[in-house]
Structure formats: C-alpha cells, structure tokens
Amino acid sequence: METNTQTNIERIAVIDLGSNAVRLVISNVVRDSEGMGHFIVFDELKEQLQLAADIDRDGFLKPPRIAQAVKILKMFKKMCFEHKVTSVHAFATSAIKRAKNLKSFLEEVQAISGFKIRVLDDEEEAMLIYQGVINSMEIPKAVIMDLSGSSCQFIQYNRRNVLNRVSLPFGTITLNQIFNDVTPSEKQSAMMQEYVLDHLRQVEWFKELDADTQIIGVGGTFRNIAKIAKRLRRYPLNMIHNYTVERDVFNSIFDSVKVLPVEQRLKIKGLSAQRADLFLAGLSCIKAFVDLISGTSIVVSGYGIREGIMFKNTMPQAIERPITDVIWHSVYTTMHNFDVNIPHAEHVCNLSIQLYKQLRVLHKLPRQYVRILRAAALLHDAGMRIKFYDHATHSLYFILNANLSGFTHREIILSAFVAQAHRKSGIDLTEWAKYSGIVKDEDLVAVMKLGIILRIAESLDRTMSGSVKGLNCDVLGESVIMKTDAGGGDCSLEIKEALNSCSEFARVYRKNLEIL
C-alpha cells in the first residue's frame, strides 16, 4: 500500500477544442513524495460550437464560428485566471486539421486568448483516448469506440496492450449534414447505418474480434444513452462511468428515437437539449457497429481524451505503462484530495484484512469481498471532510458519489455501506432498499459481516497511533478469543472501544467475542 502524504498541490486546466463543442476542465492535482499524480476535477464548462460544421464544402472554418470560438476561449482564460490555474494544456482534435485557414485561426486564438492550441493527429488522439480509458477501467479485452462530431475512433486492446486502431471520417455532425434532408427520420437512420457500415466493412480486424470482446463507448452520445437507460430503470446511483447498457436496452432506445423528429427528441428525459439534433446520427452509427460485431452490451466510459491528457501530465509513467492497479490508484486519489488520514486508514485496513482472514471459517465469504472491505476501510473516514458528527453516514454518501474508477457500481454500493458500519450498528434497510436492483440477495449478509469487522478494526486504532500491531483470533466452541499484539505498549483504550462491538458481533456471527 501507499504510505506517502501529499507534498505538492497544483491546479491544471485542459481545453478541448472539438468539432462539436469546446470544453474546459480544471483539476486539482496532488503529487505525493514520489511524484505520483492524483487529479480530481474541480470545475468544468462546456460550450456548443460545431467549429467543423460545413468544412467539407470549401475547406474553410467559417468566420462566425471562429469569432465564437475566440469569444469562448477568452472566457476560459478568465476562468483559469480566477481559479489560479498553474498550467493549461489546450488541444484541438484532428477534425479541424484539414481546414485551409487552420494556421491563421490558431494564430488569432493565441494572439487574443493567449492559448497555444496543439492540433492532434489521429494516432496521438487515439492513444490519449486509450490512456483515459485504460487508466480508469478494469476491462481486460475491449474495443473502444470514441464518437465525436466529425470522426470515429476505434481502438482494440487486450491485456493493456493496443492491438489495432482506426479513425473513420464520419461523426454525428458529418452524418447529420449528409442526410439532413432525408425524411422521415426512420429512413434517415437507415441510410446513415448503411453509410457507416460501408466504412466499417472495410476494416479487416473487425472481422476477427473475439466474441468476448467488450465494447467501451466514449463521447457525449454514449453518455446520453446511459442517462436515458438509467432513467428508464430509475437507477439510484449518480454515476455514468462504468455503467453497462445491455443490447436489448440500447435497441429499445434506438427504436424509440429513430421515429421521432428533432422537436420530439427534445422531450426525451436524460437527453441534453444541445445534442437532440445530433442524437439520431450518433445512435445510428453505434447501432451499425454493435450489429456488425454482434456486441452484447456497451460499457460507457466517463473518461476519454481529456482524462488522457490529465494522466499524461500528472503521471507520465502511465503513458509507457498503464496503471496496473486502477482501483487503488482511484481510492488513493480520493484519499489524497480529501485529506483522509492515510496512515490511520492504512492501519485500519491492515487490521481489517487480518480479521477477515482469521474469521474466514465463520464468515465463509468468497474472495471477491476482500477488495470491498479494503476500499471501505481506506475510505471509512472520508465523511470527516463534511463534519465529524455522523461522519460514518457522510462516508456512505461520499463513497456513493466519489466516482471511483475500476469498481463495478455494485462494489461501490457495498463498500459504501460497509464504511458506514464502522460507527453504526446494523444497516439502514430503507436506504439499502434503494439499491435492490443492483445488489445481490447475498450481499446484505456479507455487508453486515464485513461491517462488524471494520468496526472492530477501527476501534483498535481509536487513538490513531497504531498501538495494536497485530491480531490473533482463536475460534473455541461458542467463543472467539481475539488477542491483540501491542508490542509491549498500552492499548487499553483500543480494547475498551472494540469491546463495544461484542453484542453486534454475537448477533452477526453467532459467537461470543472476547478481546485480550
């Protein structure tokens, strides 16, 4: 486990000048003593622009759109100044690189806003998308599909190695422009699909994808699909990243939308108004790919090219070697950025794991629950950031909304309820019932068993001094004898606090607990 405390705090900004929108993302960055970077988004602003619209007609970026881009970037400049940003990384995607007036546009932007915008080529764009995804998800084999306004990137990887990539010259804006005059919308969608399929069929490696290759969706269209799917399910967790849209759900959304004119799409709950005119094009493009490779589901990534830039500038080592432990890097990012007492959290985690292993004969939980306990132990005090009183409940809500990377949504929910149990007896069944569509039947008992383990472990470091060095548990008949190793020191307060959990332990484990 990491043991470093934060030594340096920065605030960096990423400006993404895309074909459909311009976005500013400002992040707080904490670097530990070894230079490892941890970033969390501090502020974000998105402005619709469609800078690359109509570029195919004569090859030029249009003056009104250039003027609007400059105006937006001047506003971003002001925000960066007010937020005391220490460095700005501005880039434009490859969609505008073919513009005949690109050089003069970039010079005008730099002269007026001060931002030097770097235009990415297809390969660099693809690798940054890959870095954003691979450092935030634990999916071993997948094809990443990043759908923008004027291009579509596909990146195939296996075991954290890129195998193939291709950039195709269509996106939501270009498809919309090509087929804008076709009516009704259902016919328009069919023509879009056939157009996309003509391009997809020319990519040889699509034909060789294994059946278990996962589709990971990046971009605004995918995020809107996830929002709509969540609303249909009344999904209780406020998190898009790592949300899975099953094929039948996607098809249902597609079938519903393809018959709607634009004005009716504006009424779709979960769909942003700015994307209503382009949504059918995005859905049609995705539909063509999903059907081509017989994909069973889509996992939506909230991380993409902007996060790839963040990783590149906060963790340069992750460019050559992706983060091997996405989950724990994410947990430590949360701990660093929200002032969690890391030595205490790590010690409680170590004691919790010891108890878990020594009580295995009683709890009989499978190995998958270990990382749930570990996450809960490391973040059990996260709610202290709000206030001390009732901080266990604050930790519950904190974990549920922390957007932890790598975890499934179910694992996040379980970790949150286990963390709450470190100062609470039992589980709030009313709150638990909100997540009944995500958790499994056996999870409630598991959370109760893990919760009491964490509660005892936290009590055994009540002074946050690490007095209790280790534990040894003996299961003897109707009792569990827990012997503490204080290394010759005094841990009487810790033992006294832990003994308050005896009645709860007896209720959950059906054994009496003695702590020596």
Image: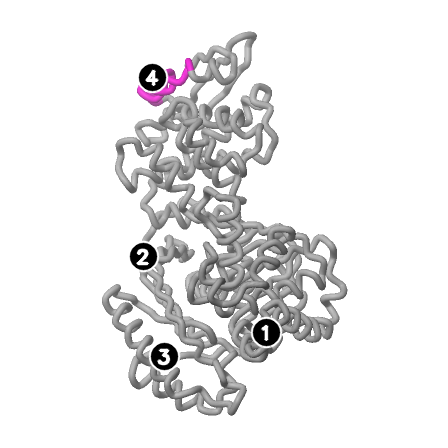
- Give the quarter of the image for residue 169: bottom right
Residue 212 included in the magenta stretch of the image: no
- Return the residue at label 3: 69
Relative to 435, 492 lies left or right: left
Residue wearing tag 4: 496
Label 2 belongs to which residue?
8
**Residue type highlighted by circle 4:** Lys
Which one is in front, 483 or 92?
92
Q: Mark 1 or 4 closer to N-term?
A: 1
Where disc 2 sits, the SS reads: strand
Instruction: Report the mark closest to the observer, 3 or 4.
Output: 3
The span from disc 1 to disc 3 (Cα, nearest Å) is 32 Å
Few, some or many C-alpha atoms within 10 Å of disc 3 (few <14, some 14-19, many ≥20)?
many
Q: Name the amino acid, label 3.
A: Ala
First of labels 1, 3 by sequence position = 3
Question: Residue 170: which quarter of the image?
Answer: bottom right
Crowd tier of the residue under label 1, counting other residues whose Cα lies within 10 Å: few below 14, some 14–19, many 20 or above: few
Residue on which disc 1 sits: 183
In three-dimensional space, the C-alpha distance between marks 3 and 4, rounded to whole angstroms, equals 64 Å
Q: Residue 391, relative to residue 218: is it above or below?
A: above
Quick check: is 498 in the magenta stretch?
Answer: yes
Q: Secondary structure at mark 3?
A: helix
Say whether disc 3 or disc 2 marks the residue closer to the N-terminus.
Answer: 2
State the extent of the magenta-drawn residues as a range: 489-503
The image shows a total of numbered marks equal to 4
